[in-house]
Image (cartoon, rainbow, N blue to C red):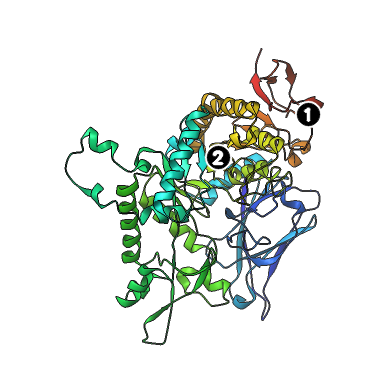
Amino acid sequence: MVVVRSARASPIAKRVRSDCFSMVNISWYGGASVHAPNWPINDANISMQPFTVSDLRDNPSGFGSVLERYFLGSSGVSVLVAPNIPLHVGMESRQQFCLQTPPSMERMPLQYTVCVGHNIRAVHQESMQQLSTARRELPNMDVLRLPFWKLLANVDSGAKLERELRTFSNRLKRHHLGEGVISLDEHSTALLASMDHSYLNSKKRTSKRQTRDLPFVKLLNISITLSPYLSVDSQQFQTSIQEGIEDYWLSLPSGPQGRPVPLLTQWKGKYSVKLNITNPEATNWFLDKVDSLHSHLGMEYVILEGGEGNPFEEQALRPPLAWVGDEYIRLLADLAGRIGENTIVTSGTRSRHKALFIRMSALQSDWSYSGLKGIILSLLHHSLLGYNFFIPDAVGGSLSAELVADDELFVRWLGIAAFLPVISFQTPPWVFEKEWVLNLTRLYIAKHHDFVIPLILKYAEEWQETGNPIYRPLWWLSPNDPITFTIDDEFLIGNEVLVAPVTEKGALQRDIYLPESDFQWQDTNNAQVFDGGTFLESYPVGLGDVAVFVRWRS
């Protein structure tokens, strides 16, 4: 049984009420992603700040791309903060985390709900029902089927970019890496968009001869990248000012009856304005832009980035009520849904039920918790908050535009990525000039297709029906076993597969804990069978291997 208690903290005159929750002898999970994640979050040390999504590349000490006002404790307790109040959150490592309303709004009380139950799993299941009553929708599951290959093209024209695409596509074929989605960043997307494809709009039937003459990009699986930002140097922005449609952009009034003045912000080093997605005419303009690109390029997927950050709050301006906190991200998810089922977003809050894939934040190309070690922590965090359909960062990390040079890091990273919803690359495996790296890449792409995708499809149906995550921490099977509360380098797919990758440089063995259960675990590599609740010390895992155990019944 789960007991739900509502708490409403009354404000004290001229002082903001702050409520704190102890992290002593209890493991806590949830909240928001951060630059160097922790599982549980007890080791995090974060100064009191607005609990809103920010771009961790610009604000590494802030809260990251996936955020929910939900905290879960290992003792069987959860805290759910009301969605409609401004909230600040701070964490004192291994001591406590605190919630408060901002000092400027001391008249607004802090409101939250506490759920208490007999174990952590039961409380989480009840909390998911409390967090959202909306019907859970499955995204386009075809996204799972092909790896994504990010094209790093330092070119200045669409024609040169098409040549780069041709070369890259030929290399994928030459190295027998199968079909894939070639992913273009926002700059490359703009280059292709600027090319003259007007002849493609002809309504006349296209002959086979004419089909061969279509731009090469139309023959590829590509994803393009868009954002709600527009450079103030662009002709489109200048035209919007001339035509008096400044309200297409987030703006401030110039006076009681004055025209709106677009709010300047920075996006990728350029002064820009941000789309006002509460303006139907502005959103229709954006949707028309996407439709035009689709007719020109025939892209498979649209990656919609740039929801993070609040330009008003970043400039210490009081935002209009419509733009308090993370409301922009929620509305951007609605806009993504209108673009179609092939849209991928890069941030999420209060949108876990929507039919969208979310791309994880970029990671460093190293073995730290900001790099390889952070992958499992991020997937557990996303799944716990209800974001099960994610595209992880590229194998080897993509925070830097440089290609990965460490083949061991690449291979160990690949071993984890093969068990996630999508395999994504920035560093192509042929750069190592080692046949064994290419062979292993082919092997893991095949394993993902044949072994992992069927599991995800199976547990996606369970998520839709119950809200249970697809990727699960070990305490999901052993909610009363304290050992499972702090294990951050293993994960479950449903209740039947346990994955234990190597995350230490140079290691060819690792310790593995198999959670208690009413069944045994079988190693898929050597067919050995072990009882649940077993601790495997210094278990051998070769460089090309990942320790994977499946549910086994005699």
Q: Residue at x 39, y 44 (%)?
A: 341
Residue at disc 2, secondary structure: strand
Alpha carbon separation for disc pair 1 and 2? 25 Å
Q: Which residue is mark 2?
A: 424
Choose the circle earlier in sequence order: 1 or 2: 2
x then y, percent, for residue 112: 61, 60
Q: Residue furthest bottom?
A: 256
Question: Looking at the picture, does residue 549 appear above or below residue 379?
Answer: above
Q: Quadrant of the N terminus?
A: top right
Residue drawn 31% across the image and 49% down it: 296
Quadrant placement of the C terminus:
top right
Q: Residue 508, labelled with which disc?
A: 1
Residue drawn at 21 percent across, 38 percent down: 206
Q: Position of residue 187 (x, y in %)?
A: 47, 56
> Going 67% across and 32% down the picture, which residue do you hit?
477
Q: Quadrant of residue 405?
A: top right
In which quadrant of the rendered view does residue 518 lie?
top right
Residue 109, image x, y percentages: 60, 70
Front-most of residues 222 and 382? 222
Q: Foreground residue, 509 or 326? A: 509
Percent coordinates x, y for residue 366 in the rendering: 71, 45
Please, what secondary structure does the residue beneath circle 1 have?
loop
Horizontal side, residue 475 vs residue 510: left or right: left
Whether residue 541 is situated above or below residue 89 in the rendered picture: above
